[in-house]
Amino acid sequence: MERAVSVAGKLGQAVLDLVFPPRCAGCGGGGAFLCDACAASLPWAAPPRCLRCWRPTADVGVCSHCRAAPPAFDGLRAAFVYTGAARELVHALKYRGITVLAAPMASLLAEAARRYELAADVVVPVPLSGLRRRTRGYNQAEALARALGRELGLPAWPGALERRRHAPPQARSADMEERRRNVEGAFVSREPGIAGRRALLVDDVTTTGATLAACALALKEAGARSVCGLAFARED
Ligand SMILES: [Zn+2]
Ligand SMILES: [Zn+2]
């Protein structure tokens, strides 16, 4: 039976490959959705950065923003800088519907989670608004969170956070304070199981960390013991 399933699985994959031959989201080359060369060239968001919000900073330890107004998350990390192949991957997953990218992207997220020693019991994606989920058909953060949960051997809880209302898309020019106000109170957690647990919040891109901070606050209000954030890429 297992053999039949695996043959059927392989056949299914072969048919898929015929219909949609894999093309690298980074360079367009054939053979894989992310080729080895593009994976190796991804721009890691390396220190020196604020240990709390991961903003590039010359300050030692925690940046002046986080000292003035500590965000609700215990620590935010981004694997890559939002540029080059990292940006291409995020776009392909979010706008071109190439959901098979979630698995290789989650392997890279898992590498970051281990590198930065992010302790967690459950993985929670940043939710999309109902409106955006209906038009896109899926939530890219949820796809990443599910695949990351499989990589780390942790449960993914896509229902742990809900959007209370439809926040307007963030304008690129919006400053930190405006972004924070836009998402303030936009999330709520009605998941009783979150109490006492360490949550790892997952999103595809972060800019100021305002959305992840608002999510972290909702999880903490529901009793989460700690909340770390992990984004695939950060707009520096
Ligand atoms: Zn490539
Ligand atoms: Zn900071």
Image (cartoon, rainbow, N blue to C red):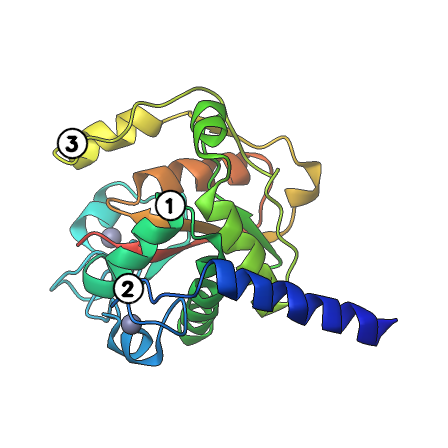
The quarter in which the N terminus is drawn is bottom right
In space, the residues marked 3 and 2 are separated at their CA atoms by: 22 Å
Q: Is residue 15 left or right of residue 192?
A: left
Q: Is residue 133 left or right of residue 88?
A: right
Pointer 1 or 3: first along the chain: 1
- The location of residue 140, given as percent across then percent down, is 45, 46
Which labelled disc corresponds to residue 94? 1
Residue of label 2:
80
Mark 3 falls on what kind of element?
loop
- The location of residue 186, given as percent across then percent down, is 42, 25
Residue drawn at x 20%, y 28% is 178
Mark 1 falls on what kind of element?
helix
Residue kind at label 2, given as amino acid type = Phe
Residue drawn at x 55%, y 60% is 147
Residue kind at label 1, given as amino acid type = Lys
Residue 25 in which image quadrant: bottom left
Residue of label 3:
174
The quarter in which the C terminus is drawn is bottom left
Mark 2 falls on what kind of element?
strand
Residue 30 in which image quadrant: bottom left
Residue 210 against residue 169 in the figure, above or below:
below
Residues 106 and 157: in front is 106
- The location of residue 135, given as percent across then percent down, is 44, 28
Residue contact at pointers 1 and 3, CB within 8 angstroms: no
Is residue 209 shown to the viewer in this render? yes
